[in-house]
Image: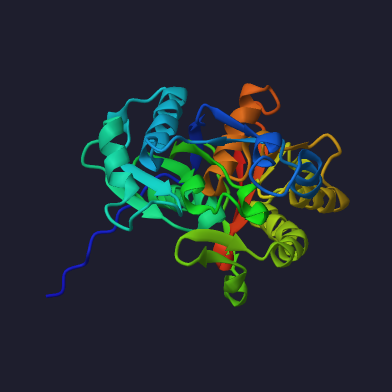
Amino acid sequence: MTRTIRQASGPAATAILGVGSYQPDRVVTNDELSTRMDTNDEWIRTRVGIVERRFAPPELSLPDMAVAAGEKALADAGLQPADVDTVIVANCTMPTQIPNAAAQVADRIGVKAAGAFDLNAACAGFCYGLATASDLVKSGSAGKVLVIGAEKLTDSIDHTDRANAIIFADGSGAAVVGPADEPGIGPVAWGSAGDLVHTIGMRDDKYIYQEGQAVFRWATTQIAPIAMRALEVAGIEPSDVDVLIPHQANLRIVEAIAKKLRAAGARDDMEVADDIMYSGNTSSASIPMALDHMRQAGRVHRGDVMLMVGFGAGLSYAGQVAVCP
């Protein structure tokens, strides 16, 4: 006779249980960049809104930063490493394809024998990871998942290229996802625009490049509708959103998204992440890092309804509603 394969099942709802972030110590100002390329503080602030960013030293690796953020997220959730059984590290800047970051990060944090994998959706990586973690828990495939976005982008930029070197920086952000009595993470609204894959990539297999104007036009026209779709699938109205956390790619893009959401009914007092100003573009780390920084600054509070939307190379995008832990 044919046997029926048993199916796992998990809780009906998940939530973010804790968050954490890490940045290198070295602050790099616009004035410093102007000493080695044709740029200046006003030019950078006007075009991308960045005042300063953080660069990691050569000896500090992507896994090092991921470990630091992951440990802080666990502490924030009041959990021990043994409480977690799965680790996801979203990134696009590991120097080699193997070994992955996740297995070594899990081991160093103390999450032994963890399910561990890297996820590359570039700047949308954290949102992809959060959605995957939530579904793993709800399906019964995982109990609690540590999701980390970590990037060392300074290893992948031409430091004389003013179009890109002024934007990218290093850092990490993390969140713990686990079961909840009430839904704390909404369904993901995700997709891709593969016909625009050429707009962001690697030059000479070494340096990040992007067609800035093309990406800007796409992001300022397409991301707000994706954010609205995330609200729709979560059953949330724009007026319910307390905090908007888009990927921190460019302050003008962030402001354009916020403007369109307010035109659709979001409140004037909706907090909008602007971590790009002092952290630069940290790709998959930018959303969890912005969340952690806003929480530390008292701009977002426990129970607040957050709308997160990531977008980047691929072009891949993802958005979801979540409740602040």
Quadrant in the picture for residue 290: top right
Can residue 180 be seen in this snapshot?
A: no
At horizontal 86% and vertical 38% (from top left) the residue drawn is 268
Can residue 12 be seen in this snapshot?
A: yes
Lateral position of residue 71 relative to residue 121, left or right = left
At horizontal 67% and vertical 55% (from top left) the residue drawn is 163
Lateral position of residue 255 relative to residue 140, left or right = right
Lateral position of residue 208 relative to residue 64, left or right = right
- In the displayed image of the protein, which residue is found farthest to the front? 35
Q: Position of residue 55 (x, y in %)?
A: 53, 37
Q: From the viewer's side, name the closer residue of 273 and 262.
A: 273
At horizontal 65% and vertical 29% (from top left) the residue drawn is 294
Q: Position of residue 224 (x, y in %)?
A: 74, 57
Q: Position of residue 179 (x, y in %)?
A: 43, 38
Q: How many marks?
A: 0
For the C terminus, the quadrant is top right
Q: Position of residue 287 (x, y in %)?
A: 59, 42
Q: From the viewer's side, name the closer residue of 306 and 95.
A: 95
For the N terminus, the quadrant is bottom left
At horizontal 30% and vertical 53% (from top left) the residue drawn is 8
* Coloration of the structure image: rainbow
Q: Is residue 127 above or below residue 201?
A: above
